[in-house]
Structures are given as C-alpha cells and as structure tokens.
Amino acid sequence: MSGPLYVPVLPTRPHAAGACRRLRPDVLAAVRPLWNLPPLPGSASETLAALVRKYVAPVSAVSRYGGWIDAPFGEDAQTGTLAEALSVYCELGWLSPVTGPERSEAQQVAAVETGRRCRRGLGVRVRVAGEWDSRVGEEVRSLLARCGPEIPVDLLLDMGAVFVDRSDAGKEALRALDALMPLAGWRSAALLGGGFPRVTADMLEEGTWDEPRTEWRMWHEVRASGRAYAPLLRYGDYGTQSVAALAQVPVTGRKGGPPWGVLCYTSDDSYLLFKMLTRGADRVAVNRSAARRVIELPEFRGAGAGQGEEWLSACAHGPLWTGEGTGGPAEWLRAGNLQHMTYVVQSLPGG
C-alpha cells in the first residue's frame, strides 16, 4: 500500500487553493488534498454546473500530484449534474471521485463509474463521528462490491471533529480500521480528523487561545497500536479551520462581517490562536502586535521555514503608519494553512 504523506481536508475556496499554490515544491509533492465542494442548495442544473467550475477549476489546477474531489453536501436531485460536472476534473485533471457508505445508491453508482472511466481510482470516505457502528462495515463491503477489483480504492476514515472530550477517538478509529482494512487491497488509507476549534469572540477575549491538537494525538495513538497496517496509515486533518466550516453556504456580495479574525500558528501539541482586527483605529497596531507575538513564540520556526512564516515575519515588522501587509481574514487563513501544512509534512515519518 502506498500513498501521500499528508491528506488535508480542504474547502474549494480561494484561500485554500492559494495556500497550496504557495507551498514549497517538496512539501506540495507530499500533499494530496481531499477537496470539498460547499453546499449549493437548490441550484438549477446549468447554474450548478457553472458553480462547480467556479469552485473546482482553481483547486484542480493546484493538485497536480493528485487528490480527491468530494461533494458531501450534494442534494439527491443534484446527483447527476454534480457527477457530470466533477467527472471533468477526474478525467482531464488529477483528482479522484469520492463516495461513502451513507451516500445514495445513485451517488455511489455515479462515483464508481467515474472512477472506472477516469482510471484514477475511488476515494471511500467513511465517517465515524462517535462510536464505531459495525453495520457501517457491511455497507462498505456492499459499496466495494460495486467497484470490482479493477478500480483502485483509497480509504478515507474521517473521524470528524476530534477535541479533548473525545478521549476514546483513538480506540474508535482502531475499531473502524480493524473492520475496514481487511475488506479491500486499499491503494492507500488515511486517518482524518479536525482539531481546530470553531472560534468565538469569547475565546479571544484575552487576545489568545491555546487549543490542543487532539487529532494529532489520536493519529499517534493509532500508529503506536502495533497493528500491521499502522505504519502505512497516512495522516489527515482539516487544516486551520473547524470541521463545521466546510458546511458554510457561500454568500456572494456580503459586506461587513465581524470586527475580528484569527491568526494561528501550529506547534507540536497545540493550535495557538491570536486575535486580529478587521477594522477600527487600532487595527494596524493590534494586527502587527499579534504577528509579533507569533514570531516571538519559542515554537516559531523562523521566517525561512516557509511562505507562511515569511508572511508572519513581514507583518510583524511592518510600519504602524500603514496597514499594507497586515492582510484580512482570507490572507490570515492562507498564511495559517501554509505554515500548518508545511509543518505537518515535515513532522511526518518520511517528511
């Protein structure tokens, strides 16, 4: 079994595509994103196809080493249009289709046919938000029967949000893997989990927040289990956004938004969050101060570590009489994902 070092679960949004575009070549070569189309409720067929092009074309362009494209929020009535629109990026690009045991029969059939036609294989995304349910294993077995032996399959075991209140996440992941791994000769298998919190204003009242990387600990627990498959299991997370962020419906033309945002930095144990301002007389001073607090961390890896650290250092050292270089929410997300993805790849065995 082979596969990527790192599988980030990312939205098909400009900030995520921009982060991948700016990764160092050696880091990008180890990354295979699981891209997620946002909910597009009630869209007519022609509009839906155009929206798929809008969201997927940019991320396909930065996925030249491969990855997966999923529409986890697709409505039943959209199945045919979504399958046809996404198949373009599987047949002519580098992405593989995705299905899962909870998807409709029509979606499963469409994904399998795309995987067969494009010869890029199929991602099987199995969600375990709580305790492992053995019935899911039988559903996966039935799904794999649709594929036949000629379609390469990748297991994407998605544990969803993994915070400190899920102390049993490693145990449940092992239960799921013990049931799923024997079902196929998986081309690759990845354990995915989201540990970045859904940030609220209350969390940042003091200006900072320290969130344990529980999903990182879960992956290490599984790797240390002694299972034969454990050394081959790939790591995946949701980057520096919460799991819930994927389900946000796009809003066009919206103005305003909250007066604050978040700058984040990843250490071995924690996500370190710092409050930023989107407007107000103190915006430049507060934002440059937040960036300085990041680069003064003992965990800061230096401006030469990657473009994320380079941006943070430039922001920290910029002048107070101009806001140029202090960015906004999209740039903070991009810088956060840049430093995070680079650090994850370098932290993994073989990275």
Image (spheres, rainbow, N blue to C red):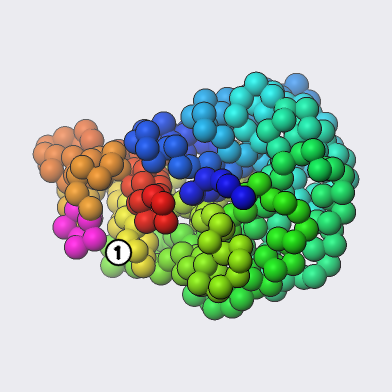
- Judge from the rendering whether residue 232 lies leftward or rightward of residue 83; answer left or right: left
Figure check: 243 above or below 104: below
Figure check: 308 above or below 343: above
Residue 161 visible, this angle: no
| Total labels drawn | 1
Of the residues shown, which amino acid type is indicated by label 1?
A: Thr
Other-residue count near label 1 (Cα within 10 Å), few / some / many at <14 / 14–19 / ≥20:
some
> What stretch of residues is rendered in magenta?
294-300
What residue sits 78% from the left and 58% below the top?
Answer: 183
Q: Nearer the viewer, residue 134 or 164?
A: 134
Give the percent coordinates (x, y) of residue 234: 54, 54
The image quadrant of residue 138 is bottom right
Residue 239 visible, this angle: yes
What residue sits 52% from the left and 36% below the top?
Answer: 13
72 part of magenta stretch: no
Q: Main secondary structure of the magenta part?
A: loop
What residue sits 48% from the left and 68% below the top?
Answer: 220
Give the percent coordinates (x, y) of residue 262: 36, 52
Q: Which secondary structure, mark 1?
A: strand
- Judge from the rendering whether residue 44 lies leftward or rightward of residue 260; answer left or right: right
Figure check: 334 above or below 243: above
Give the percent coordinates (x, y) of residue 207: 28, 62
Label 1: which residue? 208
The image quadrant of residue 213 is bottom left
The image quadrant of residue 76 is top right
What residue sits 55% from the left and 74% below the top?
Answer: 225
